[in-house]
């Protein structure tokens, strides 16, 4: 049990170390923060830029048939999900209005 607790603590510390620099920057006039890859640790940047890593991720997503499921979604399916305007790629026009 002590080993599991120590491993979880080590994983938490590792996560804080590799992401400590990348808190994101506020963008004037936007409700969200902008994140840049160069703000993170060199290890994390190298990992994200490695094409072999993304091939494995792509294989996992394709293997789970997630893309096929999303292709079958209707507009009503999107409306029923709790997604931010950024996720559904709405164009920001006015503070209270979004257009596709």
Image: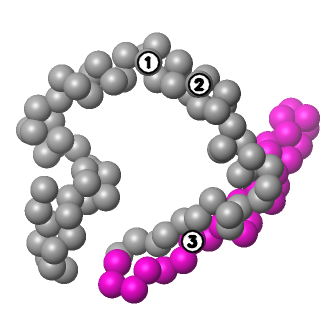
Position of residue 56 measured from the top left corner of the image (x, y, whole percent): 61, 23
N-terminal of the pair, mark 2 or mark 3, is: 3
Which image quarter: residue 91?
bottom left
Q: Residue at x 13, y 45 (%)?
A: 79
Residue under label 2: 55
N-terminal of the pair, mark 3 or mark 1, is: 3
Residue under label 3: 24
Image quarter hosting the C terminus: bottom left
Residue under label 1: 62
Position of residue 30 measured from the top left corner of the image (x, y, whole percent): 34, 78
N-terminal of the pair, mark 1 or mark 2, is: 2
Which image quarter: residue 32?
bottom left
Observer able to see residue 84: no
Q: Nearer the viewer, mark 1 or mark 2?
A: 2
Which image quarter: residue 40?
bottom right
Image quarter hosting the N terminus: top right
Q: Which residue is drawn at 20% across and 59% down?
A: 90
Query: Is 66 situated above or below 88?
Result: above
Q: Is mark 2 on a helix, strand or loop?
A: helix
Left or right of residue 3: residue 67: left
Left or right of residue 32: residue 94: left
Q: Residue at x 85, y 47 (%)?
A: 10
Q: Is mark 1 on a helix, strand or loop?
A: helix
Q: Where does the magenta region start and end? A: 1-30
Quick check: marks 1 and 2 in contact, CB under 8 Å?
A: no
């Amino acid at each position: 049990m002590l080993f599991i607790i120590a491993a979880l603590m080590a994983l938490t510390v590792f996560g804080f170390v590799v992401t400590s620099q990348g808190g994101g920057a506020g963008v004037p006039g936007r409700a969200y923060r902008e994140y840049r890859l160069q703000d993170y640790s060199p290890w994390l940047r190298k990992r994200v830029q490695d094409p072999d890593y993304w091939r494995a991720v792509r294989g996992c997503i394709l293997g789970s048939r997630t893309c096929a499921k999303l292709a079958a979604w209707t507009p009503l399916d999107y409306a029923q999900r709790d997604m931010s305007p950024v996720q559904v790629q709405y164009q920001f026009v006015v503070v209270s209005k979004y257009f596709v």
